[in-house]
Image (cartoon, rainbow, N blue to C red):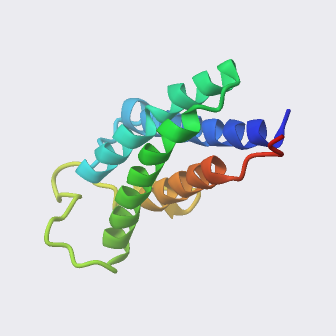
Amino acid sequence: MSRDDLALTAAFLIALAAALGALFIGEVLGQMPCTLCWYQRIAMFPLVPMLGLSLWRGDGAARMYGLPLALSGLALSGWHSGLYAGLLPAPIVPCTENGPSCTGEAQMILGLPIPYLSLIAFAAILVCLLLPKGNRA
């Protein structure tokens, strides 16, 4: 397996873990995502089949198509993490008192809140997609 394949495989596995984790939290645990979490899912979920198909075909074409999704997801999760941490003023509160919320203790995984995990996942996928290609001859 080449270095390019390893980076693409890592990006695929990260996207798959994030998507399965989001589905588990929502469908199995019954915890509804907030609005910003939904938007991040819109950016994450298509990465799984896109990166998987690119791996299967061995063409690496998903890099070009995955970059805009990874960048938009990174921007959304960065904004969400900033709101969560209180670093950004919050004229629009993404997590409501009596609706979906990602601020409770039940929304922590491995001691990290979901917005931070999303930020880490998108950043890691972006790094994997931007890693320089191998020797070009």
Camera-side residue: 108 or 54? 54
Could you tell me residue 94's position as x and y percent? 22, 59
Q: In which quadrant of the rendered view does residue 6 lie?
A: top right
Could you tell me residue 27's position as x and y percent? 38, 30
Rendered view: 113 above or below 16: below
Task: Count every numbered label the image shows and give the total.
Answer: 0
Q: Quadrant of the C terminus?
A: top right
Q: Is residue 109 visible?
A: no
Rendered view: 34 above or below 62: below
Camera-side residue: 83 or 44? 44
Could you tell me residue 39's position as x and y percent? 30, 46
Q: Residue furthest top?
A: 57
Could you tell me residue 106's position as x and y percent? 41, 53
Q: Identify the residue at image location x=28%, y=52%.
A: 36
Q: Identify the residue at image location x=41%, y=36%.
A: 29
Rendered view: 135 above or below 75: above
Rendered view: 54 above or below 40: above
Q: In which quadrant of the rendered view does residue 75 lie?
A: bottom left
Q: Identify the residue at image location x=70%, y=36%.
A: 9
Q: Is residue 87 visible?
A: yes
Q: Quadrant of the N terminus?
A: top right
Judge left or right: residue 100 versus residue 22: left
Judge left or right: residue 117 versus residue 84: right
